[in-house]
Amino acid sequence: MSLEQVRFNMVEQQVRPWDVLDGKVLGLMDTTPREAYVPKNYRELAYADIEVPLGNGQAMLPPRIVGRMLQAVNMHPTDVALEVGTGSGYLTSLLAQSIRKVYSVDIEADFIARAQTTLNEQGLTNVVLEVGDAAQGWDKHQPYDIIIITGSLPVLPDSFKQSLQRGGRLVAVIGRGPIMEATLITRIGENEWSSQVLFETELAPLQNAVAPKAFTF
């Protein structure tokens, strides 16, 4: 079976059935070579419905979750995005093909180096990759139209919401296992945000994510 056919099957059998109906997102995932972003020893799993290991205890998001996140943020060609958790660079590449600029940060320097090489090979030049700890926010290039956080958070730090442009959209998986909620937050005013739960899932925590202090008597 050709890679094109396997990619098509991923879209039709994993992504679309998960209520991803945005033609732009489906088209992107159908034409982007996910195998280029998967570590070489896991290439045969590039289109499997699993979290492909990346090393350092991290993993790629399953394709269906990537699709739902991208659909939720409603990408526009003029958008500027922040991605927290570059990982393999796969989601980074899908953003970069759709919007004006992507800033992506990861705490793992080797992930950044590997992703930079792959993105260069794919000819994507509108991405800035940075090594750093963005668990509490990353306001260096704010305001952002889009923020996607690829690791779960017990609570969402307020700094992320403040970094959104008015009308900006943020997707994060919030809560504690076994039930966490992928949530879309939209900035609708200077001090006003709307929140919509998209789906329940369980995702590995973002490194150095700070849990709220427990209440003590």
Image (tube, grey):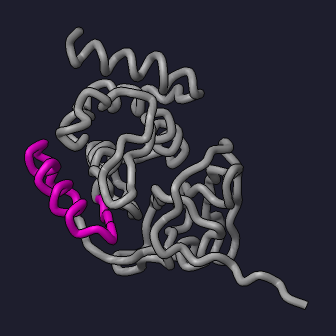
Q: How many marks?
A: 0
Q: Where residue 181 sits: x, y (%)?
A: 67, 51
Range of residues picked out in magenta: 102-127
- Which residue is outermost to the bottom? 217
Q: Residue at x 38, y 77 (%)?
A: 133
Q: Nearer the viewer, residue 155 or 160?
A: 155
**Side of 17 where 217 appears, left or right:** right
Q: Is residue 169 visible?
A: no
Q: Is residue 209 above or below residue 66?
A: below
Residue 107 belongs to the span the image colors magenta: yes
Q: Where residue 28 sits: x, y (%)?
A: 33, 32
Q: Is residue 205 above or below residue 10?
A: below
Q: Where residue 42 sits: x, y (%)?
A: 26, 36
**Side of 74 where 88 appears, left or right:** left
Q: Residue at x 57, y 27 (%)?
A: 18
Q: Is residue 19 above or below residue 90?
A: above
Quarter the C terminus occupies? bottom right
Residue 14 belongs to the span the image colors magenta: no
Q: Residue at x 45, y 69 (%)?
A: 207
Q: Nearer the viewer, residue 38 or 128?
A: 38
- Which residue is outermost to the top? 1
Quarter the N terminus occupies? top left
Q: Is residue 47 visible?
A: yes
Q: Residue at x 27, y 46 (%)?
A: 93
